[in-house]
Image: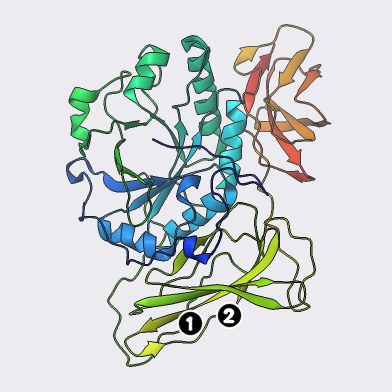
């Protein structure tokens, strides 16, 4: 089952600060791949793993272990931008195809949740965005739930051309809260049933909700390559891998390994959560790595601890926070230890203290682009009154909206007027009659406009 967790700066919601380096997860045992599983070949479904914020950032060694286990597709939750974007980037860099999912909360606007999820992954080549429908709806009835899901699907399908939208759920939830409705049979289905059956052909005895066939099944949750909460799936993938990785075995050149690259956290990052997973990329033929962490005391760098690990990562919760830390890595092969990498310096928590003169201020990640307004109204109707009320759903933190109105002509569409407003509704008095009107909306957050919505169309006789 998927999980949802909001990360809060300066809190310790789930992981208590460790009392010393001996308590850290240093991954001292080499990762072991699961027995190779090629996926549900008969149904053209890949072996897929889905992860969330709970699974932490993923190391290259973990992703390559996924590959050795047969995983070719990774689905990432959009609970937290730092973790989600790192997981997606790592999966792409190691030749995987990717999807994303948004965990649906019934006490929040679903279109806004979808917009936020798309904004978080806007520059990643996802094939599908999944609506994760599993939260207990409390007293919300089936009719209201169905309407909300329809709103979410519509918002999802209207947001990013080329990205398919799907539903993730389980038969128990669907039958309990939606009375086994068949209202969504046109939407791709990914269902969860932890019976360890790995074929989509089992749908003949597991079917629900009126779907003719699913595109994916989540058949178990089990540790995989050091990722304790990974979900195992078979999934028909909708997009080709964006990157091909050369996995030809390296040749021993008789020299020590190069310094590791691709350190995470990268130089200048701010880590607002209550642990940090320091890691590097792996080096061909290296069998051991050292990760050396230091803390800035206000006047000098002091050693915190140096870990040895065959997997090039360690998850640590330093007790000093907020603070400024830096780390570096080196690798060992049959010929000895190679050179240390450059340092990567990061803020752990909201650090406001002194900095070394050579350390630049932290580079806050750029905010995600604003979400896209949805549920434009009216759409597909004829207006017989002197005025028409135009509206859309709100975008989180938006301060300004633009309504761009156009009219139909013999040769196409012509601009009518673009209205700039502080709200999500306006009254239009059409001055041209006997034509079609259409309009679209975009929102401004932090002085930046997001993408335009799809058009809504109406007729004025």
**At numbered mark 1, what does the secondary structure look like: helix, strand or loop?**
loop
- Seen at 31% across and 35% down, the residue is 215
Residue 322 at what x, y percent from top left? 70, 58
Task: Work out whether residue 145 or residue 302 is closer to the camera in this orientation and state it.
Answer: 302
Task: Work out whether residue 395 or residue 441 is closer to the camera in this orientation and state it.
Answer: 395
Residue 262 at what x, y percent from top left? 51, 71
Furthest toward the bottom, the residue is: 254
* Residue 182 in view (yes/no): no
Q: Which mark is residue 172?
A: none
- Seen at 82% across and 30% down, the residue is 422
* Residue annotated with mark 2: 342
Q: CA distance from mark 1 to mark 2?
A: 8 Å
Above or below, comparing residue 42 to residue 421 in the picture:
below
Q: Quadrant of residue 412?
A: top right
* Residue 43 in view (yes/no): yes
Q: Quadrant of residue 376?
A: top right
Quarter of the image with the C terminus in it: top right
Above or below, comparing residue 262 to residue 236 in the picture:
below
* Residue annotated with mark 1: 259
Position of 308 with respect to 347 (left or right) is left
């Amino acid at each position: 089952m998927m999980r949802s967790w909001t990360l809060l700066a300066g809190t310790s919601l789930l992981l208590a600060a460790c009392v010393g380096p001996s308590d850290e997860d240093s991954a001292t045992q080499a990762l072991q791949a699961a027995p190779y599983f090629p996926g549900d070949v008969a149904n053209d479904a890949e072996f897929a793993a889905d992860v969330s914020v709970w699974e932490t950032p993923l190391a290259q060694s973990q992703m390559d272990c996924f590959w050795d286990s047969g995983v070719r597709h990774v689905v990432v939750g959009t609970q937290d931008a730092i973790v989600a974007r790192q997981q997606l980037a790592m999966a792409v860099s190691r030749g995987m195809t990717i999807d994303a999912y948004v965990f649906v909360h019934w006490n929040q606007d679903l279109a806004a949740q979808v917009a936020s999820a798309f904004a978080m992954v806007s520059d990643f080549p996802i094939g599908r965005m999944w609506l994760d429908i599993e939260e207990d709806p409390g007293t919300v009835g089936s009719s209201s739930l169905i309407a909300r899901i329809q709103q979410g699907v519509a918002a999802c399908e209207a947001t990013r051309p080329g990205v398919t939208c799907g539903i993730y759920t389980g038969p128990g939830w669907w039958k309990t809260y939606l009375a086994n409705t068949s209202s969504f049979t046109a939407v791709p289905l990914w269902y969860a049933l932890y019976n360890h059956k790995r074929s989509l052909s089992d749908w003949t005895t597991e079917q629900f909700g009126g779907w003719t066939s699913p595109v994916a099944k989540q058949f178990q949750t089990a540790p995989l390559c050091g990722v304790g909460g990974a979900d195992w799936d078979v999934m028909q993938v909708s997009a080709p891998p964006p990157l091909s990785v050369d996995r030809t075995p390296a040749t021993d050149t008789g020299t020590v390994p190069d310094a590791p690259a691709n350190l995470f956290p990268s130089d200048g990052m701010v880590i607002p959560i209550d642990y940090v997973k320091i890691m590097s990329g792996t080096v061909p033929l290296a069998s051991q790595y050292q990760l050396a962490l230091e803390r800035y005391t206000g006047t000098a760098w002091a050693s915190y601890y140096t870990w040895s690990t065959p997997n090039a990562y360690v998850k640590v919760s330093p007790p000093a926070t907020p603070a400024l830390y830096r780390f570096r890595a080196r690798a060992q092969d049959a010929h000895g230890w190679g050179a240390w990498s450059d340092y990567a310096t990061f803020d752990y928590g909201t650090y406001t203290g002194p900095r070394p003169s050579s350390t630049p201020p932290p580079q806050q990640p750029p905010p995600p682009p604003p979400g896209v307004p949805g549920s434009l109204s009216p759409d597909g109707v004829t207006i017989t009154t002197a005025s028409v009320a135009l509206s859309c759903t709100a975008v989180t933190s938006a301060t300004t909206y633009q309504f761009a109105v156009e009219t139909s002509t013999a040769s196409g569409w012509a601009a009518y007027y673009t209205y700039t407003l502080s709200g999500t509704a306006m009254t239009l008095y059409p001055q041209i009659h006997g034509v079609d009107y259409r309009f679209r909306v975009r929102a401004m957050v932090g002085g930046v406009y997001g993408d335009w919505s799809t058009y809504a169309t109406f007729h004025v006789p």
